[in-house]
Amino acid sequence: MGLLFAFLAVVSWGIGDFLIQRSARKFGDWTAMFYVTAFAAIVLFPFAVFNLPQLLTNPTGLITLIIASFVILIAGLLDFQALKVGKLSVIEPIYAFEVPLAALLAGFFIAEWLTFWEMFLIVSLMLGIFLISVKSWKTLRNLHLEKGVILAVLATIGMGGVNVLFGVGARSTDPLMLNWFTSTFMAIVTGCYLTYNNHWAKVKSDWQANKKLIFSVGIFDTIAWVAYSFTTLYLPIGIATGITESYIGLASFLGVVFNKEKLKRHQWAGFFITVISAIVLAILVNN
């Protein structure tokens, strides 16, 4: 079941991140986040409403969800802004480091240490994702001059923490409650920001003109986070993060097939390293 949910998260994130970048550039990061989180809050409410009384009697779970909400709000805004102002060829290689970071944080904070071979495969996955993401070594040499780099680094650190908090939150409550709670929190905060800045007229016009894009990004992002949360019920958080982050390899493959993009030699090497590492890791976990 863990591998099934991980596969669902990979596919959904592969499509969702592409749509998030389009949304952030079209609407702005606050408005784009409002659309995504409001969609999830509404869709997941029927699944979470009956568990609300139990949440109120579960202080550990409630505190975990509150902390997770704050961290994902900050990390999400940094992520959206980095994608908005930066180049994918610069931002994506930085995000590869989210994989080992999540594994290390899970080890330090919840003592979920991986075996040597599991950690080896996690590092291999990171290397593969990094190579796929690097479209130009020249760009990386000028990394300090590129827009969005600092934001991407901060977002990576934040998302590493989010992965751990979502795993802990899913286990202490349930995945649907976790995603509804965090989405509702972010929708309220971003909604307050939009109200304070008198942006509702633009939000309404964007909604009327871009319903298909808004629904699409809402659907795929919600499915991805729910699937990842379920994955952490069956797999260690570090492994769940490693397998699901391999969506970058899927995105590159889709680009080759549908957009006729050409990958360089190091990108093909990264693609095969990512796929092989993910498959071996899945087999190792399954056994």
Image (tube, rainbow, N blue to C red):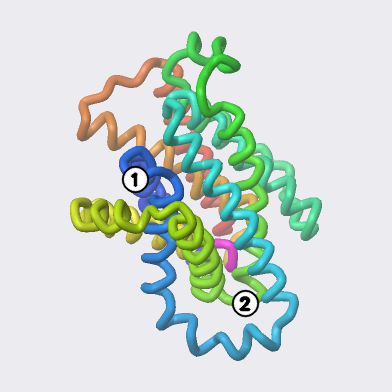
- Label 1, residues with CA under 10 Å away: few <14, some 14-19, many ≥20: some
Disc 1 target residue: 27
- Label 2, residues with CA under 10 Å away: few <14, some 14-19, many ≥20: some
Residue 130's mark? none
Q: Is residue 273 magenta?
A: no
Extent of the magenta region: 229-233
Q: Is residue 276 above or below residue 16?
A: above
Task: Say whether residue 220 is left or right of residue 54.
Answer: left
Q: Is residue 230 magenta?
A: yes
Q: Quarter of the image holding residue 64?
A: bottom right
Disc 2 target residue: 173
Q: Quarter of the image holding residue 219?
A: bottom left
The one nearer the camera, 125 or 227, is 227
Q: Is residue 251 above or below residue 140?
A: below
> Residue at the spot x=56%, y=46% of the render?
242
Label 2, secondary structure: give it: loop
- Counting from the top left corner in percent of width and height, residue 50 is at 50, 89
